[in-house]
Amino acid sequence: MIVDREHDSHRAIKSVGRCEVFQSFVYLGSLIDNSGT
């Protein structure tokens, strides 16, 4: 049971990290678009 819970938390951390990376890419993209115009 404990192992399953740890596995789930690891998966959640991975997905959260991926989401943060995606958001940072979108943020950088918007910054580049704003500076380009």
Image (tube, rainbow, N blue to C red):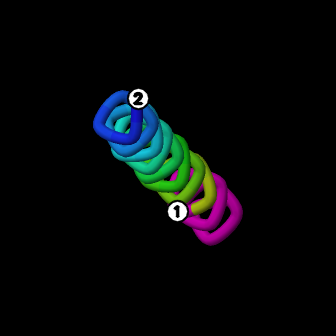
Q: Is residue 12 above or below residue 24?
A: above
Instruction: State which region is magenta.
Output: 28-37
In the picture provided, is 32 more to the left or to the right than 3? right
Residue at the image point whose x is 49% and y is 39% from the top: 12
Q: Main secondary structure of the magenta part?
A: helix
Q: Secondary structure at mark 2?
A: loop
Tell me the amino acid under the disc marked 2.
Met
Q: Which residue is mark 2?
A: 1
Magenta stretch holds residue 18: no
Residue drawn at (62%, 71%), measured in percent from left and top? 35
Q: Residue 26, percent across and down?
A: 57, 47
Measured as percent of width and height from the top left, residue 31 is found at 62, 66
Residue position for label 1:
28
State the image coordinates of residue 5 (x, y, percent, origin top left): 45, 36
Identify the mark nearer the N-term, 1 or 2: 2
Quarter in which the N terminus is drawn: top left
Which residue is at 52% across, 62% downward? 28
